[in-house]
Amino acid sequence: MRVTPKATRNVNNAHDPEILRGLHTAIIDLVDEINRPRRDDRLIEEAGIPLDRALFPLLARVWRYGPIGVVELADRTGRDHTTISRQMSKLEDLELIERKPSITDRRVREATVTEKGQEMIDLLNAARERLANRILVDWTDEDLDQLRTLLRRFADDLMR
């Protein structure tokens, strides 16, 4: 007996390949657009802060995931840990982060955002909100809430 593709999808809980391809291309387009250097430049300019574009993603991730060590930060950014270590030293010199020995492993120095760094993060978040409001001018709050909910669910499932 021959199994039809539809029956196979139901048995294996597989989804429509066309929908999955469309989702995949939308995610690639989104990631590509977010990773464009001009996006970071525009955000930094909108925030009115003097921050090197190369340091911006690190400061944002230290704020999001801190306390965080160099190795984990390198893994999250897809960069070499020696590069991350140098850039974290720059952030430390600018007094935007501080590094202390980890409570769980004294060999690891973990970074957290300083008060000065938090002020910069606050300016970046306000700028991000202004830019988002310009981009999403035609979206309703319900649309945005649905997108937020589904993206959070997707991110959580992906991280499992």
Image (cartoon, rainbow, N blue to C red):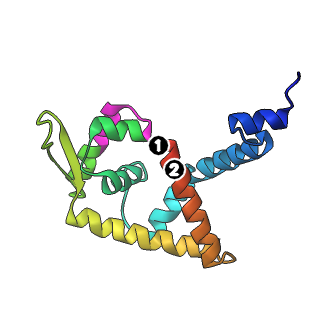
- Say if 142 sits above or below 23 in the image: below
Instruction: Inspect the image, locate mark 2, and give the three-letter code of the amino acid beneath it.
Output: Ala
CA distance separating discs 2 and 1: 6 Å
In the image shown, does 113 or 89 lie closer to the viewer?
Answer: 113
- Mark 1 = which residue? 159
* Image location of residue 89, percent across then percent down: 23, 44
The residue drawn where x is 37% and y is 59% is 51
* Image location of residue 52, percent across then percent down: 39, 54
In the image shown, does 128 or 152 lie closer to the viewer?
Answer: 152
Instruction: Inspect the image, locate mark 1, and give the three-letter code of the amino acid beneath it.
Output: Met
- Mark 2 = which residue? 155
Residue 44 sits in quarter: bottom left
Can residue 48 be seen in the rendering of this structure? no
Q: Dots 2 and 1: beta carbons under 8 Å?
A: yes
Task: Locate residue 136 relative to residue 51 in the image: left or right.
Answer: right
* Image location of residue 132, percent across then percent down: 56, 70
